[in-house]
Image (spheres, rainbow, N blue to C red):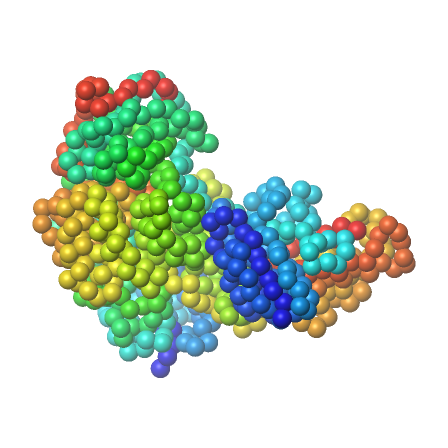
Amino acid sequence: MTATRALVIGVSHYDHLPGPTGATHERTFHLRRLKSAATSATHFAAWLRSEYRAPHAPLAEVRLLLSPSPSERKRLAGEDKRAPAATAANVRAALDDWRKECLGDPDGVAILYAAGHGVLLNPIDTGILLLQDFASDPARLLENAVSIPGIRGGLADAAAPKHQFYFLDACRVRPELASRVTLADAGLPGWDRPLREHAIASPILYGAAADTLAWGAAKRGTIFSQALLEALRVGAVEPGRPAGWVVTDTSLIPPVMARVRELAAEHGVEQTAAVGGQPGGVPFHVFAEPPPARVRLSVAPAQAQDVAYFSLSTEGRSLVERRRGPVTKVVPAGNYVVKVAIDPDTPPFAPHEAAWFVRPTGPEEQVLEVPL
Amino acid sequence: MSGLTIELPEATAPAEVRDEALALVATLPSGERTELPPGRYWASVVLPDGEVASRSFVLAGDEDLDIRLGEDPAPAPARALGILPRIPDPTAPRAFAKRWSANDFANWRMDIARPGARSIAAADTVAPATDRWHVRLVSGVSGAPAPGAPEPRLGEPSPSGAVEVVFTTPPAPAALFAQIARAGTVPLNVAIPVAPGGECRLAVRAGGGGRIEAVADPSPVSATARSVGLYLAAGHLREAAGLASAAEQLLAGKVADPIGATMGGYALLRLGRLGQLHDWPANLAAWFQWLPDGAIVAGELAALRGDPASAREHFGEAVRRGVPLFTDGLSLVARRAAEGLVDGPDARRLAALAARATIGPLTVTVRAFDPTDPLSSLRTRLQFQARRGWTTFRNPL
């Protein structure tokens, strides 16, 4: 069956890391338990279940593994409560099952989202997510960790989905220890990988550029997940090729990068998103209808408002008919003709007609002020 | 049918033209004409600085229309995600002409927040220090001072306030590093991505803990290659690919631009546009023997095409040529070495260097006494003799 298969992992709780006040250790990279990674994973899983749309590959399942903090566990609801813990054994089993189902469906879609502590060992295309039981063996520190590029490589097979999308919501900092000790690569996935990559698109969107940190806020989730969900709903939405409204892997990149930077600045930190893997400019999320946009029509100067009447139409359909401005309305995004009639005739004001491209804006208003 | 031609700023990705229903009807490079039936259309282009210029227009029957996008930018504050402000900005351009006329439309610009803080010459301003600091050029093959290198000079301060050092590379083809250091510190080495006899600018500043930080501006010969770098830095990968397909032309002509071609090659590899690479990376590798990155691009392309024999040959040649100039190249070598596609002492040395390189800059950046020997990374330098190629500056960083 041609389908979308998603694997979502969120790790806030770590068995061998201290809480907010405990002493940290170099051997565990001076890390502490987290508060928002599991929340972010549940938010993304919820978006997949309720909003994601790929007409050619309907969502078949969302495999969710969670290691929530105690406060996050209290907020879990519904099926999220039954999500297995993100330990190495559970993640390995889930990865193998997910891969097995993906292989043999080259027209399908594979999605992976992973949030938690992350490290990297190599400047390019490495991002390792630490799992709940990270550092359980001090002699094999990264045994209970999973390489996201390794997962991508293991799905480079010709039988794997041609469209794959990876999201790593984690820091990507090379541990200080790595300057003195050659760390073995992540224990998972451990798959063999073909030399030649067959996917048309298999980008990795990183919440943090190489050698930088990723940040989060309890309850709200990570900065990256907030930026990603905003982009999926508004900022990355663009006219499709050939038509319709879509979010593509490439249209996601600039708004996510921009919004991550903005949100980080609002919290007084720095964070930069980055992209790796192989973007392809392919649709990731397809809208059934044009997304909504809130528009406001007015004229200038203000004294013309009383005699100016707006009409708004698109493809022969009228959405606003002879209404005196200012006009505020929610309309489908698209190409419109705006007409301004003057009644009664009031020189020097003259009728106007022109085109206006209305972008999706979510709750924000898009304002058009017509100069008369 | 009517004809449409769009004029764009130099080195800009092709514009998209959509009909009233927003179906894509044409993708037009600058100056290229297309025929369309009469009707209402919308044209847009992403500029190298990340902003979007667009215009709606009407094509009447049997007319030829020329429009320009990206001209006469009006100052407008950055907006997040293309969302416009609630209150109209009085400085923003007006969207409508007073009369309905296809040629009278104002140039409507939709501003999106610039994602790129990763300008290729960016450096954050920090408090100045007054210690002396020293620079020189060294070989990326031997680590020895580059023979015949003119003395570097100070340029204009960068927009961020960093000190700019201008290097002119010697005429002998070689991959070179700029070494910058203070007494008692481990030198910083930054690859200089410039063809022989070219000029490269380095933005130098004092970083945390008194360390020196520096970023190289590749200064490729062509505006096309520079725009590719800007698009990549801003995350506009589709637009970068649209321009990078012209990278092949950067190898031809009277003034070959191997650096620009290499940047285009890395961009196309990053985007998986293997078809657009054709076979010219092999020429890049063969014609510019001093450039490790040319062989890396060729090797990676061969690997992705499932030709391990060619990949091994190219990667083997690449590691023999020395340290790559671009971080992408060093990382590809490290990854393919880990996979066993290339082996030997040179490959292992580069893989070790990759583990110590600074992550993020466009060109290879590593703190080491000798950039070709990663095991020397903890040695500090105490002497900076002119006869060893050093130039001393006293300008505050």
Where does the image place residue A100, in percent across and percent down from the top left? 26, 75
Q: Residue furthest left?
A: B344
**Left or right for A205, reference A159:** right
**Left or right for B50, reference B144:** right
Compare residues A143 and A121 and report the one nearer the observer: A121
Q: Residue furthest bottom?
A: A1
Where does the image place residue A305, in percent across and percent down from the top left? 82, 53
- Identify which residue is drawn at 39% across, 70% down: A79
Q: Is residue A176 visible?
A: no
**Left or right for A217, reference A371:** left
- Identify which residue is drawn at 78% across, 67% down: A321
What quarter of the picture does the N terminus of chain B occupy? bottom right
Compare residues A225 and B52 and report the one nearer the observer: B52
Where does the image place residue A205, in percent across and percent down from the top left? 37, 56
- Identify which residue is drawn at 80% across, 65% down: A322
What quarter of the picture does the C terminus of chain B occupy? top left
- Identify which residue is drawn at 83% across, 55% down: A350
Where B176 falls versus B50 (above or below)?
above
Compare residues B350 and A58 and report the one nearer the observer: B350
Where does the image place residue A111, in percent across and percent down from the top left? 36, 67
What is the quadrant of residue A130 in the picture?
A: bottom left
Where B369 falls versus B79 (above or below)?
above
Q: Is residue B168 visible?
A: yes
What is the quadrant of residue A195 in the picture?
A: bottom left
**Left or right for A11, reference B48:** left
